[in-house]
Amino acid sequence: MKKKKLRRLIKNVFILSVIGGIFIAGVLVIWVSTFTIPNLDSFDERRVAESTKIYDRTGEILLYDVFQNVKRTVVPFDQISRNVKNATIAIEDAEFYEHHGIKPTAILRAVLVNIVTLGFSQGGSTITQQVVKNSLLTNEKSIARKLKEWVLAYRLEDVLSKDEILNMYLNEIPYGGSLYGVAEASQAFFGKEPLDLTLAESAYLAALPKAPTYYSPYGGHRDKLEERKNLVLKEMFNNNFISEEEYQSALKEEVTFSPQSDQGIKAPHFVIFVRAQLEKKYGEDVLESGGLKVITTLDYELQKKAEEIVERKALENKDKFNAENAAAVAVNPKTGDILTMVGSRNYFDEEIDGNFNVALAHRQPGSAFKPFAYATAFKKGYTPETVIFDLQTEFSVGCSPSGEPLYPSAVCYMPGNYDNIFRGPVTMREGLAQSINIPSIKTLYLAGMKDTLNLAKDMGIESLGSIGQYGLTLVLGGGEVSPLDLTSAYSVFANEGVRNPYRSILEIRDKNNNIIEKPDLHPRQVLSAEIAGKISDVLSDNVARTPAFGANSYLYLPGRDVAVKTGTTNDYRDAWIIGYTPSIALGAWAGNNDNSPMEKKVAGFIVAPMWNEIMNEILKTLPDEKFNRPARETSLDLKPVLRGIWQGGRSYKIDKISGKLATLDTPPETLGEIVVGGVHSILYWLDADNPRGASPQSPEADPQFIHWEIPVRDWVARQGVIETDETIVPTESDDVHRPEYAPKLDITNPQAGSIWGSSDRIVFSITNTGRYPLSKVEYFLNGRFLGASSASPFGYSFIPNETEGVKSQNTLKAVGYDNTFNKGEAETNFSVR
């Protein structure tokens, strides 16, 4: 009985499943029958209406419309080069002439990936599918849309021949910007008809559609375009479209791209930068027909001024310094917003490849890298007043201190300063402010290359790689960094150690005006406010930099707190300047795109005038903010070399009045010191890794010690410096300042417990029976400073109802100082009615 019921149940389930399957299949067939073959007549209209538009930060100034001035010319199939057709098939759909619109294996793979990821982004698209997708369907990522694409692709193959489908594809495919179709692309890029393109030119065109903005020959990824072009050629060879000889010849072919035309774009370097980000995140299809409204961070009013100044100054520099190009970028330290980005003197200037965005290019920063080493040193415990000897020094331990190799393969390193002058003892403040090389190299050694590199990366410089790539030349700009990254990193100093990664987009809305992206700020404290403040204090110290730049240089903006650092590479191929206030960081670069050297002038002459003019324009729009400057460390407990004292390293506190050793009773006003021990390099007095710890027992254990010490000792001999030792240290202690010698004060008026009217004048009287005569008496009423008297009889008077802080019950305290700064106190109480 049970078996009968089970068989009946299975039979019923089977019948219902069959009926359900037939019903679903029927619905699917009816749905599929409603699909229509693509009609390309409305292609342009649909895309124009839904193209992405990029605005400045106000949301009102249109910088770029992705589909503005769209260019699309249809050409017959026989007017398109065989190379273009084969290159496209090889890289996009090698089995195009074998399949029937879809590839089942690719579809199966896509289905599996979509099920796993739930992203519905995989489609294994053939050329036929791309025609369907580009001409009819929306960019919605759904199973229904993908199914429509598969069905229509299959049906399209029944209606059109393979050549017709390929012709449709080549006539509508996007090649970047407003260029659609192979005819417009071949004219725009090579000035040729598509029938006349060479094999290498055809490979370039086939390389572009995957990511037209990223691979654009006018963008910043020419190396990646070259790689993809070579991949196209490789696929053509692998699929027997070209011979070995043709393949090798095309690899070597020199191709020249036509200059890019003005397409009604504002702030082009910035717009292309933003477009590349959008394309990477949302894809080319969404970018072209998703109807996005992108509000960027750009301040177009400042951008216009910056573009005008950069072009004018770059043309001046071309005549004066053989520096034909320039770039500038400004970042808001408090948000990371990119406010201006000028990537060349003129985006459309073909003479200098103006479309290449130098603001994103990696160049050697020269001395502009030095602040990261000094910040690391300050972080470790060094101070801006730390003394380092600026003397010619051999830094390679494989060489003798005089610069002779100790073994055949040794490479010596004895750099000089930009002015070939060696100054002797200088502070870290002077070394950084005046950009002196020798103290800066020594600072990098003291700070540690690994820690310096890590700090630079934390502050936003990701392009430097690992420590193994560098030696002590790192501090002179041995690595490479982009103006955008370097300016963004400097903004951390401006923002008291808080890093806001740079951003270019404030908000993105879809075609229905719904916000789909609004990037949040992600501030991170990567450097203490104190250390950032020390760097800002040094870089804004016009007095400290005056010996190198003059008192009224382009680095100085009267009335404004501006920190500035320049950088010039040793071969004069790059001139930099980065400056900032608490509200803005502005970086500028000058040089030549082909990396040829400029005239042998430092950045202060070449790029600083341009930076100064742009910064003045920006500061007109910003409040006058000041840096928070940390107090200078003056405690005598700090090692002398960290306080700017180079004449010795052992310190003894003395009383300046008695000339004897200070005691706990010696007042701060008479505290002095004697420094002895001779003149030595900093490594003699402290451990490089622990500058505030105990002095090293064996300084020579440091591998750099001998190389630093010998030049110092030679300098002492040449200068005839008189050195001191412990024989000048007093042996007796301060006997002027003792508790029993302190002033013994007695307040004779007002008397304790006396009562006064609120309008009475109360006169203070005081006597002293201490050892030394009084020099000053200070009076405090209820803890509040009331006044002082510096002349005998040291009286003072006040009227209660004219004085703040008077109560019914009051305490008067007198603090007296004698002429040796001993201190004594006395108190009394009185009442006021």
Image (spheres, helix red, strand yellow):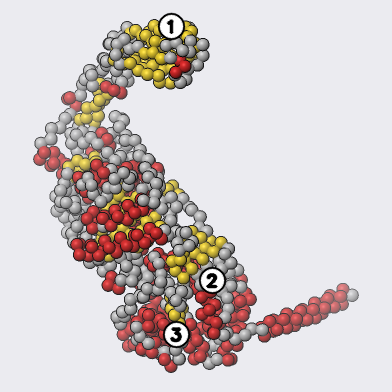
Task: In the displayed orientation, state which residue is furthest to the right.
Answer: 1
**Quadrant into which the N terminus falls:** bottom right
Query: Comparing marks 2 and 3, which lies closer to the viewer?
Result: 3
Quarter location, residue 313 = bottom left
Task: Specify few, some or many for label 3: CA neighbours under 10 Å numbering under 14, 14-19, or 20 or more.
Answer: few
Please say if 768 is above or below 821: above
Which amino acid, mark 3?
Thr
The residue that appears at 21% across and 52% down in the rendered structure is: 396
Secondary structure, mark 2, is loop
Q: Is residue 643 left or right of residue 404?
A: right
Residue 62, percent from left and from top: 46, 66
The residue that appears at 58% across and 67% down in the rendered structure is: 512
Of residues 106 and 222, the one nearer the viewer is 222
Q: Distance between the residues labelled 2 and 3?
A: 23 Å
Please say if 475 is above or below 358: above
Which amino acid, mark 2?
Gly
The residue that appears at 37% across and 70% down in the rendered structure is: 219
Quarter location, residue 569 = bottom left
Secondary structure, mark 1, is loop
Which amino acid, mark 1?
Gln
Quickly name the residue at label 2: 290
Please say if 501 is above or below 136: above
The residue that appears at 38% across and 16% down in the rendered structure is: 779
Quickly name the residue at label 1: 751
Quickly name the residue at label 3: 73
Residue 829, percent from left and from top: 46, 10
Q: How far apart are marks 1 and 3 (CA)?
A: 106 Å
Q: Do the residues labelled 2 and 3 touch (CB within 8 Å)?
A: no
Residue 625, percent from left and from top: 38, 44
State which tag comes first along the sequence, 1 or 3.
Answer: 3
Secondary structure, mark 3, is loop
